[in-house]
Image: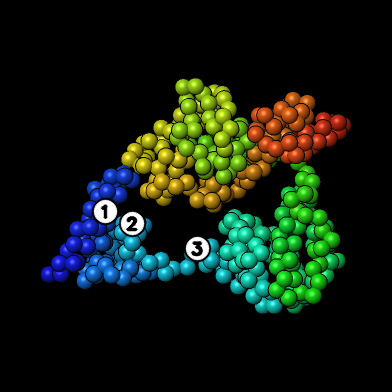
């Protein structure tokens, strides 16, 4: 028989489960599974010490109908959960850095950790930045490892040779990542000289903006089949919405009767195509998650259980793994520039971009408009 303190604890977790179920639209079967899972975990527990998340996962593994995420949400709400697991990004960081050649892996791992956590002189960067920077430098390190054994052996000519084939945003990202890596290495005394000192900052490198090819457009058409995929592609291809802005859109940002949508704080009208895509998605959303309390426009089976946006990697990994949304967005702005005489002010007003970016797209459009027409030119 449970002790009185255990009984009080079970009653408290039961009340909290019911409250969360009402807030997030959990089904009766889900609530039952959570209650059974909590009873199993709290058997003999006084509530004085939080329960490790690793224990929750291990003990509920045999209970197919007890959701670890929902049980953890109840325990967290009551201050009864201790997350003793390694964050996904840290596990990814350790795994990917461990795949590098031995002479480089320790220094690169230390650099990635500083990117993620920050230090006295560096602000923390987003998980996306950490992944992009690592993806940019990894091919260089693997190539250098054939003749070099450590970061201190990399020279400026080595860096120039690695960057030589790259163009546009790939070169820009690579320069930013390499400068970050070697600045870190110089501060820590891992290199005698910084081989990237002569490079211009990556963010100031002029990007080469070209229209999407017919093959790329076909790939987008083939990928955008579900209501969620059509919503994401439509917002990028029609409104030039950034992935982050798409993830953060709320239901209140969409006004179907007035045909207006507010993207990243910028209200704008929408036409028949966007109206059709939005209606299809909203109908699918309501039919699939009728009881969700999440007010974000785009939700998934995971985010529907809470109130936050879909994860940073959701769009690329789960919806459009082979179609870069940023490529679609840039093509939309370029096509607008081509159709309106390369007017940067027009681009600024339509897409809410800064004047420097607008000037860049206008310059790219003028180059394309002034170029002699050729059989291979494709403007998507």
Give the residue drawn at x 73%, y 76%: 189
Question: Badge 3 local density, few (<14 within 10 Å), some, or many (20+)?
Answer: few
Q: Secondary structure at mark 1?
A: helix
Nearest the viewer among 161 and 53 is 53
Query: Where 95 sits versus 20, above or below?
Result: below
Q: Which mark is residue 16?
A: 1
Question: Badge 1 local density, few (<14 within 10 Å), some, or many (20+)?
Answer: some
First along the sequence among labels 2 and 3: 2
First along the sequence among labels 2 and 1: 1
Do callouts 2 and 3 mark residues in contact (Cβ within 8 Å)? no
Percent from the top left, x then y, of residue 334?
Answer: 72, 34
Do callouts 2 and 1 mark residues in contact (Cβ within 8 Å)? yes
Percent from the top left, x then y, of residue 8?
Answer: 18, 62
Percent from the top left, x then y, of residue 294?
Answer: 40, 42
| Residue 130, image quadrant | bottom right
Give the residue drawn at x 57%, y 38%: 264
Nearest the viewer among 2 and 102 is 2
Question: Mark 2 to mark 1: distance in Å?
Answer: 8 Å
Q: Nearer the viewer, mark 3 or mark 1?
A: 1
The answer to whether residue 155 of the structure is visible from this angle is yes
Question: Mark 2 to mark 3: distance in Å?
Answer: 22 Å
Residue 337 relative to residue 112: left or right = right
Q: Nearer the viewer, mark 2 or mark 3?
A: 2
Q: Which mark is residue 77?
A: 2
Q: Which residue is mark 3?
A: 88
């Amino acid at each position: 028989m449970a002790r009185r303190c255990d009984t009080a604890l079970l009653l408290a977790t039961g009340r909290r489960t019911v409250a969360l179920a009402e807030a997030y639209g959990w089904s009766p079967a889900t609530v039952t599974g959570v209650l059974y899972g909590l009873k199993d975990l709290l058997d003999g527990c006084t509530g004085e010490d939080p329960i490790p998340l690793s224990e929750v996962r291990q003990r509920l593994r045999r209970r197919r109908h007890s959701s670890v995420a929902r049980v953890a949400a109840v325990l967290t709400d009551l201050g009864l959960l201790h997350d003793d697991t390694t964050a996904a990004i840290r596990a990814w960081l350790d795994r990917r850095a461990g795949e590098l050649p031995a002479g480089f892996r320790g220094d690169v791992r230390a650099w990635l950790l500083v990117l993620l956590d920050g230090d006295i002189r560096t602000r923390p960067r987003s998980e996306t930045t950490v992944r992009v920077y690592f993806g940019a430098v990894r091919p260089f390190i693997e190539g250098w490892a054939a003749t070099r054994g450590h970061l201190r052996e990399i020279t400026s000519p080595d860096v120039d040779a690695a960057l030589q084939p790259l163009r546009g945003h790939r070169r820009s990202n690579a320069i930013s990542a390499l400068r970050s890596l070697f600045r870190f290495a110089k501060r820590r005394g891992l290199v005698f000289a910084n081989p990237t000192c002569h490079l211009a900052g990556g963010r100031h490198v002029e990007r080469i903006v070209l229209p999407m090819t017919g093959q790329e457009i076909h790939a987008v058409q083939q990928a955008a089949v579900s209501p969620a995929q059509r919503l994401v592609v439509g917002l990028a291809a029609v409104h030039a919405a950034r992935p982050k802005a798409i993830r953060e859109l709320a239901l209140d940002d969409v006004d179907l009767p007035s045909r207006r949508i507010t993207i990243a704080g910028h209200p704008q009208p929408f036409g028949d195509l966007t109206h059709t895509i939005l209606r299809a998605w909203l109908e699918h959303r309501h039919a699939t998650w009728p009881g969700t309390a999440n007010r974000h426009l785009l939700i998934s089976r995971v985010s529907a259980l809470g109130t936050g946006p879909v994860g940073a990697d959701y769009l690329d990994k789960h919806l459009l793994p082979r179609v870069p949304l940023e490529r679609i967005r840039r093509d939309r702005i370029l096509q607008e520039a081509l159709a309106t005489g390369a007017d940067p002010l027009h681009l600024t007003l339509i897409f809410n971009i800064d004047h420097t970016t607008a000037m860049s797209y206008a310059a790219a459009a003028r180059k394309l408009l002034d170029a002699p027409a050729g059989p291979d030119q494709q403007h998507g």
